[in-house]
Image (cartoon, grey):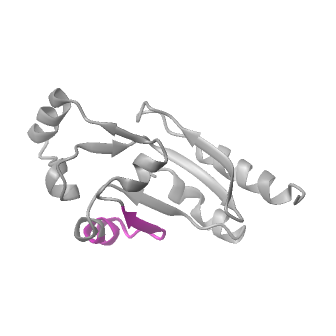
């Protein structure tokens, strides 16, 4: 989500809104929204139900959990759950309940270029409706 705010205004102008899912519980999300002054809707998926249903959940291995603790990242505190699941970063563009564009990369360091999302949004809106 780090790069998507750069195109948020353009997406809104196209009639597209950004909705993000986070494994954090609602109280943690409010702090995130306030801190970063997010303009998009951020929804809690602390039980990981949505990311599991979408096939985007992965369990953080024990070595990473310990490394996170050294950085003061507490996944149990953040989610309120002990599942140690995080989502694969993904972007979906949906029109009329149909996914028209999807991107997911299991390597969380590789994020989609916002220009690609914007181009896909423009293309999907120009596509003839069936």
Image position, residue 86 (x, y; %): 32, 44
Image position, residue 7 (x, y; %): 60, 58
Between 95 and 31, the one lying in front of the other is 95
Could you tell whether 113 is left or right of 60 in the image? right
Q: Residue at x 22, y 46 (%)?
A: 83
Q: Residue at x 15, y 51 (%)?
A: 76
Vertical side of 99 occupied by 68: above or below: above
Q: Residue at x 16, y 30 (%)?
A: 62
Q: Which residues are magenta?
A: 30-44
Between 12 and 66, the one lying in front of the other is 66
Between 79 and 35, the one lying in front of the other is 79
Could you tell me how many numbered marks the image carries? Answer: 0
Is 7 magenta? The answer is: no
Could you tell whether 39 is left or right of 81 in the image? right
Is 42 magenta? The answer is: yes
Vertical side of 34 occupied by 50: above or below: above
Q: Residue at x 48, y 68 (%)?
A: 40
Picture quadrant of residue 22: bottom left
Could you tell whether 111 is left or right of 59 in the image? right
Q: Looking at this view, name the residue that lies furthest to the top.
A: 63
Image position, residue 106 (x, y; %): 44, 32
Q: In the rendered view of the protein, which quadrant contains the C terminus?
A: bottom right
């Amino acid at each position: 989500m780090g790069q998507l705010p750069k195109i948020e205004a353009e997406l809104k102008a196209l009639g597209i809104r950004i909705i993000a899912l986070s494994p954090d519980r609602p109280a943690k999300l409010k702090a995130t929204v306030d801190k970063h002054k997010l303009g998009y809707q951020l929804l809690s998926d602390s039980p990981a139900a949505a990311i599991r249903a979408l096939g985007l959940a992965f369990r953080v291995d024990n070595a990473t959990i310990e490394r996170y603790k050294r950085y003061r990242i507490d996944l149990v505190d953040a989610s309120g759950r002990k599942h140690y699941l995080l989502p694969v970063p993904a972007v979906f563009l949906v029109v009329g309940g149909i996914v028209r564009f999807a991107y997911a990369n299991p390597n969380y360091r590789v994020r989609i270029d916002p220009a690609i999302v914007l181009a896909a949004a423009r293309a999907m809106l120009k596509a003839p409706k069936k």
